[in-house]
């Protein structure tokens, strides 16, 4: 079975963010190349600090960034080699929860979840509404679904952003720093929703989580936790 996500000897160096470059004494040289294979049904957490390069993994996996070397395969494809229309179709198979949520402020939480289904599918309106209702209930958003992001708390915004990522019931979920500011209980609920339930092989979906750390409660809920230092895997389990 094809691995849903493969990084082969990929440098994680890139033009540094201003906040990182401004760190006193920051050495932006990464030590080497990053390699990782995420197997089907597996949940993998890749953590590291601002200088580790882990915050580039989502963009590389989605084809939003061109790797400076090596190769990235997502669901068996080098996404950057696909045509523009093929890339758009391909991304329906991957759920993406970006750091900072990325919700549209002029839409309600429900409308944010509905958005990719409305403009990225040929589903009937009845089917769209049914799918959105299921996601809203699953993520415990029924009470606040008609609020705009500015009217909702951080937890509900994060739940809505995940709901939008799950709109197409993707095979693979990539979540960037999804647990920042969340309680351990909420973090556990978000992770279980991303996994999509359990099968004999593991989670129904394959999940890659990136960020600076992993809440203690979740350490037994991920299949592997990998620590990256200056672009290379230093430790894992």
Image: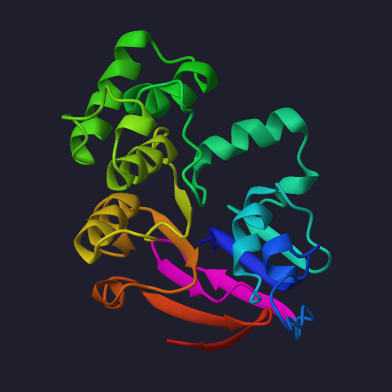
The answer to which image quadrant residue 113 occupies is top left
Instruction: Determine the residue positioned at 29% across, 17% down.
Output: 129
Q: Position of residue 33 (x, y in %)?
A: 74, 79
In this orientation, which residue lies closer to the viewer: 65 or 5?
A: 65
Measured along the vertical axis of the image, is residue 76 above or below residue 30?
Answer: above
Q: Is residue 12 visible?
A: no
Secondary structure, magenta segment, majority class: strand
Say whether residue 115 is left or right of residue 126: right
Residue 49 in the magenta stretch? The answer is: yes
Q: What are the residue bounds of the magenta stretch?
A: 33-50
Image position, residue 91 (x, y; %):
58, 39
Q: Position of residue 114 (x, y in %)?
A: 39, 23
Q: What residue appears at the point 70 percent right and 47 percent down from the top-left corner?
A: 64
At x 65%, y 53%, the residue is 59
Would residue 202 be found to the left or right of residue 233 on screen?
A: left
Residue in the picture at 18% in, 34% down:
137
Residue 60 seen in this snapshot: yes
Q: Is residue 220 magenta?
A: no
């Amino acid at each position: 079975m094809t691995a849903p996500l493969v990084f082969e000897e990929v440098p994680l160096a890139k033009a540094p963010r201003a906040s990182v470059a401004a760190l006193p004494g920051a050495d932006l040289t990464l030590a080497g190349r990053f390699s990782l294979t995420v197997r089907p049904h597996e949940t993998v957490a890749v953590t590291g600090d601002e200088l580790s390069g882990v915050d580039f993994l989502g963009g590389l996996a989605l084809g939003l960034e061109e790797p400076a070397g090596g190769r990235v395969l997502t669901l068996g494809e080098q996404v950057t080699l696909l045509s523009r229309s093929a890339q758009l179709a391909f991304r329906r198979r991957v759920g993406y929860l970006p750091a900072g949520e990325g919700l549209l402020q002029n839409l309600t939480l429900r409308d944010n979840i509905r958005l990719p289904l409305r403009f990225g599918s040929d589903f009937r309106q009845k089917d769209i509404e049914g799918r959105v209702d299921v996601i809203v209930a699953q993520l415990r958003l029924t009470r606040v679904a008609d609020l705009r992001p500015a009217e909702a708390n951080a937890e509900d915004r994060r739940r809505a952003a995940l709901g939008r990522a799950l709109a197409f019931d993707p095979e693979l979920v990539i979540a960037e720093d999804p647990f920042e500011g969340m309680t351990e209980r909420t973090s556990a609920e978000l992770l279980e929703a991303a996994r999509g339930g359990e099968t004999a092989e593991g989670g129904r979906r394959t999940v890659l989580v990136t960020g600076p750390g992993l809440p203690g409660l979740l350490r037994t809920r991920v299949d592997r936790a990998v620590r990256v230092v200056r672009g290379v895997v230093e430790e894992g389990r």
